[in-house]
Each structure stands twice: as C-alpha cells, then as structure tokens.
C-alpha cells in the first residue's frame, strides 16, 4: 500500500514538473490567462464573459427616456 502511494506521488510530481517547465525555465514565465476576457480570438468575435455581460446590462443607458414612476390610483 505504501509502495503504491509513493509511486503515485512520484508520477504526480513528475507530471507537475513537466507541465511547469516553460514557467520555470522561461524568464518572466507565467501561467497562461485562460479566462474568456484574456482570449484575443474570443474578443475579436465579440464574445465576453458572463460577468462582463452582466455589467454591461446593468449599466445605465444615457440615451434612455426618463419615465415618471407615479402610480395613479383608480
């Protein structure tokens, strides 16, 4: 059981080192930005994240007509 655990731990450690080679070796290496807003191809197509779409929907429209909120009782 312990042998299996150590072998699994070694395999996971090797995989993590191999996945981070470019980050460790490259000067100024960083993890890639995988967020929707960080992808230039999606931005070109006009696709944005749900958070950005929500902010845009909640923004007040300066061209909107002001309406009175007076309620007439019948």
Image (spheres, helix red, strand yellow):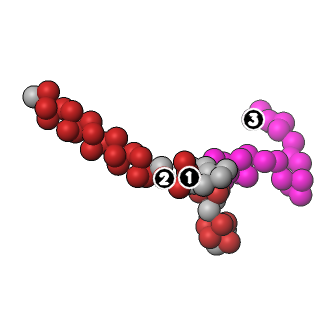
CB atoms of marks 3 and 2 within 8 Å: no
Residue lying at 68% horizontally and 72% vertically, measured from the top left: 44
CB atoms of marks 2 and 1 within 8 Å: yes
How crowded pointer 2 is (Cα within 10 Å; few <14, some 14-19, many 20+) is rated as few
Q: Which mark is residue 74?
A: 3
Q: Which residue is mark 1?
A: 25
How crowded pointer 3 is (Cα within 10 Å; few <14, some 14-19, many 20+) is rated as few
Percent x, y of residue 57? 71, 51
Q: Secondary structure at mark 3?
A: loop
Tell me the quadrant of the picture where the N terminus can be found: top left
Residue lying at 89% horizontally and 48% vertically, measured from the top left: 66
Q: Which residue is mark 2?
A: 21
Q: Secondary structure at mark 1?
A: helix
Mark 1 vs mark 3, foreground winner is 1
Of pointers 1 and 3, the one earlier in the residue sequence? 1
Residue 26 as seen in the image, left or right of residue 69: left
50 inside magenta stretch: no
Magenta region, mostly helix, strand or loop?
loop
The magenta segment is 51-74
Percent x, y of residue 8? 22, 39
Residue 60 as seen in the image, left or right of residue 50: right
Residue 68 as seen in the image, left or right of residue 5: right
Percent x, y of residue 69? 83, 38
Q: Secondary structure at mark 2?
A: helix
């Amino acid at each position: 059981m312990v042998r299996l655990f150590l072998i699994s731990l070694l395999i996971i450690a090797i995989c993590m080192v191999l996945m981070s080679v470019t980050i460790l070796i490259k000067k100024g290496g960083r993890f890639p930005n995988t967020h929707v807003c960080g992808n230039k191809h999606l931005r070109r197509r006009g696709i944005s994240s749900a958070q950005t779409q929500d902010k845009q929907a909640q923004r007040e429209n300066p061209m909107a007509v002001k309406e009175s909120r007076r309620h007439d009782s019948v």
